[in-house]
């Protein structure tokens, strides 16, 4: 870029602010350009344009000297500000990338080892859980304690030809217990099992008397007339359990189960 040096300038107040008026208010001027920065063609173009404004420059000076101190200060401020701006953008990009990656890894860690959302696939747990409802399933519960009677659990399908890959049922009998149905009631160890979670008048049929093997559980759906459960596939193995459903997430009634 060329530096315009005004020589014997009249008071600037006499100019109307335009370049032509400003140059016209001077007795003379010199065009200075720095070697290696301004090309000769550009210098010639600048000098030619100046000739149209006033009588022409008093001279053209080529110099390798650095620009004046104020110009150097402005250049340093610009370069420093530009570098700082690039640094902020780089830091922000790294911070957001790290945050998103951490959230992504945390999500998959929670889903794989802590808890997951499960959609009810059928009406086998109606009216307590209806098709399309969602529950949160804890995968840590049974690492801390054993399965309890009455727990609603999600487990892998025990038979490969079942439609759903995962089933949700209620634990009604534990390993070593005897289970059977009589007169529409469920008996465990020859005692009628109080099932307050069932609607009044619900009948339980189709359970022949048998002992639940070690490491297995007897599971049934609350909808006893429309549930493929242990009456169909037998006692469920412990290693098939995914986790315990503990929170009703979608559609009322919301809350802990």
Image: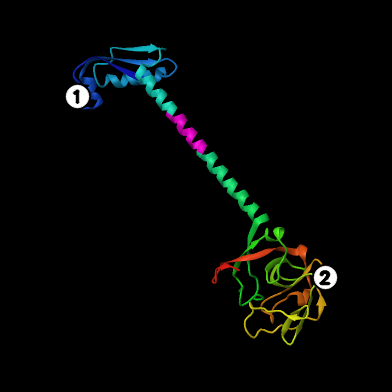
Secondary structure found at label 2: loop
Is 85 inside the magenta-drawn segment? yes
* Figure check: 134 above or below 103: below
Residue stretch rendered in magenta on the structure? 81-91
Residue underneath mark 1:
15
Label annotation for residue 213: 2
Colour mapping used in the image: rainbow
* Figure check: 113 above or below 125: above
* Figure check: 46 above or below 214: above
Residue at image point 64% right, 86% down: 201
Label annotation for residue 64: none
Please state if 116 lies on the left or on the right of 23 as rendered: right
Quarter holding residue 112: bottom right
Q: What x and y, as percent, mark residue 121? A: 65, 71
Q: Nearer the viewer, residue 75 or 244?
A: 244
Q: What x and y, as percent, mark residue 255? A: 56, 67
Q: Quadrant of the C terminus?
A: bottom right
Is 32 inside the magenta-drawn segment? no
Quarter holding residue 7: top left
């Amino acid at each position: 870029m060329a530096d315009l040096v005004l020589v014997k300038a009249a008071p600037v107040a006499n100019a109307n602010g335009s370049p032509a008026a400003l140059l016209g208010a001077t007795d003379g001027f010199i065009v200075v350009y720095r070697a290696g920065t301004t090309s000769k063609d550009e210098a010639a173009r600048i000098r030619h344009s100046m000739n149209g404004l006033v009588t022409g420059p008093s001279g053209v000076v080529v110099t390798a000297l650095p620009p004046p101190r104020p110009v150097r200060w402005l250049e340093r401020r610009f370069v420093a500000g530009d570098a700082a701006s690039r640094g902020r953008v780089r830091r922000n990009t790294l911070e957001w990338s790290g945050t998103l990656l951490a959230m992504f890894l945390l999500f998959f860690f929670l889903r794989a080892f802590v808890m997951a959302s499960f959609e009810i696939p059928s009406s086998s747990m109606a009216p307590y859980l209806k098709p399309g409802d969602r529950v949160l399933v804890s995968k840590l519960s049974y690492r801390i304690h054993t399965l309890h009677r009455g727990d609603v659990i999600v487990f892998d399908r025990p038979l490969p030809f079942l439609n759903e890959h995962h089933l949700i049922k209620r634990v009604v009998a534990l390993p070593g217990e005897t289970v059977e149905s009589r007169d529409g009631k469920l008996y465990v160890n020859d005692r009628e099992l109080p099932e307050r979670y069932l609607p009044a008048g619900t009948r339980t049929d189709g359970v022949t008397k048998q002992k639940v093997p070690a490491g297995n559980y007897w599971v049934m759906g609350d909808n006893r007339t429309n549930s493929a459960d242990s009456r169909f596939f037998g006692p469920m193995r412990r290693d098939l359990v995914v986790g315990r459903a503990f929170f009703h997430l979608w559609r009322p009634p919301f809350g802990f189960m």
